[in-house]
């Protein structure tokens, strides 16, 4: 890719970003759009929009930027929870890392790369210059200037490790202080026990009562056995829908809307009064609910919530094996009322084990098969390959602007469209692994999406672009640095365009919320449907965090290889900080809280990125005929792994469970049991 093609891609994406900002600043002020751009404020009764015409509504403004920037971290914590604070700390950490990287990379390494003569390029023909002129490939082999790159790798590693330690320490202390300051939650005194052994002549409830009364006589409080109630859940959902329709019908004050045919889509059947029709249906559902509630009492499954008098007793029970057989009486922390995922409560140990095995195989197959669309995308970056595939496009491909758009913008856009399918698939995989909490499902999906993305966006693109035919070399670990040293710099131009397309434009489209806007318009103006109650969305951390970490990996790897990518990454993180702060304050509301447990994923990803940078540095200095520098890099990944081992021992236990000191002995001062807080529609 030449510089003019990159500038074309940047110009297109920059224009889209400004368009999204302008449209957002106008549309957010229009009547009826509050449910799209501020659903959280609508649910909390803080949205104030009048239907009167106002010229100011038609003018774009940047007031939302100030309102997103102004709230403190403590205010964000009180409104959106600790997970939101940790999410924003990822942007802060990344912005700090790449602010330093821009200073070193752009102002020191980039000029050295550009003034090299290895590629024999005309330094004065800047617009038509290949972007490889800005990479380390242009530095002369054996040049003493490469020692500057060597020093930069060491200094950058030290800075990243220092910032990682600082953030780990800050977030772990924040997690503990948040635990101290929050009120005791019922689920903190409760554990979930699964795989309860069946006893002849006794129900599961009697078995649980007998077991915990015997072994926890002073701390055991009560229990609740899970029962099958899927039919009851369906009845309650139907009654909720009918009730909302009935309320809307009574408030509509339109006599014509009350009468409709009872058949398909209101076109066939007898003409009925909808008011009487819905009331009769509600009465029938009420009778069915009562009958189902009485029959559900006997549908017990081998799982129960067990409550203790103190948090300490509950924590101790979680970490102790309850029975001689480790596959029975399996205890784990109880999820919060809004965090419960019911389908796998009755699953046996064997079924959960088989489900995990199936998911692993399916994940590997999907990861391998996704290389096919990656190969198609890589073909778009090579015009000669496109001319072979589509010979009728030869004339069109010779137009300069079309060539620049296809090679600079289209590949990353197509790849981004393919990637939209990945997070929902990973959520589906994680949901059948036997988890009983949505937060654990999303954490598992986050890890899957992250490694899927790293393999298929970074490794597959790098290898398919220049070394796929030599993939067997990776079976010989000694040759891995050399293979990556050849392959990675050649794909710098693609990843710069990918950062601009997937980073800038996708983040700006998050602000615009086009899909939700269109759906809301159709619902209000075409279907004439207005819901008195609507669900406030929650931020999908499992899809957003992997994308942020992928950009971090690209920035760390290309820090000394192709520093031209660094300013685009810094702009992305600054842009993301403002946009997601606005979304967390106005759009998204947390459904459940993990206490910042996603940060260890961030830490491990950054350590992996550093190690990968070191491996590539070993290979690149060897190819550049500087063997001493290549040898002196070898201790760096070892030191980084030692640092990571220390951080895992120092901080990771604080994210797995709270200490005895945190779990101070407190008496359970709650009226009733925690499961009474469950919504009526939740069931197995």
Image (tube, helix red, strand yellow):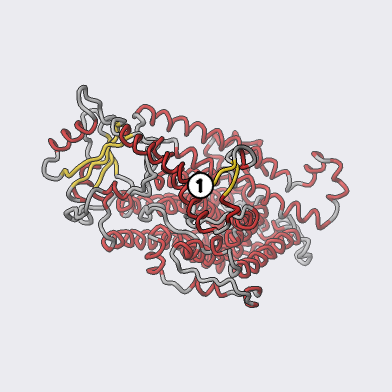
Q: Is residue 632 visible?
A: no
User: Compared with residue 365, is residue 526 higher up or lower down, i.e. above or below?
Assistant: below
Which image quarter: residue 520? Answer: bottom right
Where does the image place residue 257, in percent across and percent down from the top left?
59, 52
Front residue of this view, candidates 524 and 260: 260
User: Going by the picture, which residue comes out furthest to the right?
Assistant: 395
The foreground one among 292 and 618 is 292
Front one among 5 and 85 = 85
Determine crowd level at label 1: few under 14, some 14-19, many 20+ residues with C-alpha closer than 10 A. many
Q: Quadrant of the C terminus?
A: top left
Residue at mark 1 = 450
Looking at the picture, does residue 361 appear above or below residue 161? above
- Is residue 209 among the parts visible in the rendering? yes
Which of the 4 image quadrants contains residue 200? top left
Dot 1: what SS?
helix
Residue located at (76% from left, 52% from top): 406
Camera-side residue: 476 or 674?
674
Coordinates of residue 372 in the picture (x, y in percent): 65, 37
Q: Is residue 142 positioned above or below 454 on the image? A: below
**Residue farthest to the top?**
200
Residue 181's x, y, as percent?
Answer: 27, 63
Residue 99 placement, left or right of 335 = right
């Amino acid at each position: 890719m030449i510089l003019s093609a990159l500038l074309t891609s940047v110009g297109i994406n920059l224009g889209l970003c400004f368009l999204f900002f302008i449209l957002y600043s106008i549309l957010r002020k229009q009547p009826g759009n509050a449910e799209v751009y501020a659903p959280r404020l609508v649910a909390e009764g803080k949205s104030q929009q009048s239907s009167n015409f106002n010229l100011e509504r038609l003018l774009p403004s940047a007031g939302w930027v100030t309102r997103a920037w102004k709230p403190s971290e403590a205010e964000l914590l009180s409104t959106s929870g600790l997970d939101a604070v940790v999410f924003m700390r990822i942007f802060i950490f990344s912005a700090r890392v790449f602010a330093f990287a821009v200073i070193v990379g752009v102002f020191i390494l980039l000029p050295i790369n550009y003034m090299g003569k290895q590629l024999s390029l005309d330094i004065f023909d800047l617009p038509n210059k290949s972007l490889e002129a800005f990479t380390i490939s242009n530095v002369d082999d054996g040049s003493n200037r490469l020692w500057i790159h060597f020093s930069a790798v060491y200094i950058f590693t030290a800075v990243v490790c220092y910032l990682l330690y600082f953030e780990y320490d800050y977030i772990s202390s924040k997690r503990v202080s948040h635990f101290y300051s929050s009120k005791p939650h019922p689920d903190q005194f409760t554990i979930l026990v699964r795989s309860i052994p069946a006893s002849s002549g006794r129900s599961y409830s009697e078995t649980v009562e007998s077991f915990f009364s015997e072994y926890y006589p002073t701390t055991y409080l009560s229990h609740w056995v899970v029962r099958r109630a899927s039919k009851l859940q369906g009845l309650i959902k139907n009654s909720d829908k009918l009730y909302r329709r009935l309320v809307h019908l009574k408030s509509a004050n339109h006599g014509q809307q009350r009468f409709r045919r009872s058949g398909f889509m209101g076109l066939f059947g007898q003409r009925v009064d909808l008011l009487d029709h819905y009331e009769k249906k509600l009465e029938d559902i009420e009778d069915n609910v009562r009958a189902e509630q009485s029959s559900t009492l006997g549908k017990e499954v081998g799982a129960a919530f067990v409550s203790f008098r103190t948090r300490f007793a509950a924590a101790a029970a979680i970490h102790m094996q309850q029975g001689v057989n480790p596959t029975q009486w399996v205890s784990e922390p109880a999820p919060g009322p809004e965090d419960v995922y019911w389908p796998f409560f009755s699953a046996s140990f064997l079924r959960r084990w088989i489900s995990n095995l199936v998911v692993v195989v399916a994940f590997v197959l999907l990861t391998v098969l996704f290389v096919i669309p990656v190969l198609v995308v890589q073909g778009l970056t090579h015009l000669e390959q496109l001319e072979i595939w589509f010979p009728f496009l030869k004339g069109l491909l010779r137009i300069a602007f079309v060539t620049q758009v296809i090679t600079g913008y289209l590949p990353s856009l197509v790849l981004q469209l393919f990637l939209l399918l990945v997070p929902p698939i990973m959520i589906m995989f994680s949901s059948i692994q036997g988890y009983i909490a949505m937060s654990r499902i999303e954490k598992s999906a986050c890890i899957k999406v992250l490694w899927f993305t790293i393999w298929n966006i970074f490794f597959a693109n790098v290898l398919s672009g220049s070394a796929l035919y030599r993939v067997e070399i990776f079976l010989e670990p000694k040759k891995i640095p050399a293979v990556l040293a050849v392959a990675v710099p050649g794909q710098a131009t693609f990843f710069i365009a990918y950062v601009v397309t997937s980073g800038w434009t996708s983040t700006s489209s998050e602000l615009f919320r086009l899909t939700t806007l269109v759906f809301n318009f159709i619902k209000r103006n075409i279907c004439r449907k207005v819901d008195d109650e609507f669900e406030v969305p929650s931020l999908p951390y499992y899809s957003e965090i992997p994308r942020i970490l992928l950009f971090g990996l690209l920035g760390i790897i290309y820090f000394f290889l192709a520093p031209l990518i660094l300013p685009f990454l810094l702009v992305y993180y600054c842009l993301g900080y403002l946009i997601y702060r606005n979304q967390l304050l106005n759009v998204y509301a947390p459904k459940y809280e993990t206490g910042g447990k996603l940060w260890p994923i961030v830490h491990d990803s950054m350590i992996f990125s550093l190690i990968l940078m070191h491996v590539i540095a070993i290979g690149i200095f060897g190819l550049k005929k500087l063997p001493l520098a290549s040898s002196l890099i070898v201790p760096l990944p070892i030191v980084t792994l030692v640092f990571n081992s220390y951080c895992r021992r120092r901080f990771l236990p604080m994210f797995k469970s709270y200490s005895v000191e945190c779990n101070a002995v407190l008496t359970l001062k709650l009226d009733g049991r925690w499961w009474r807080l469950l919504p009526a529609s939740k069931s197995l």
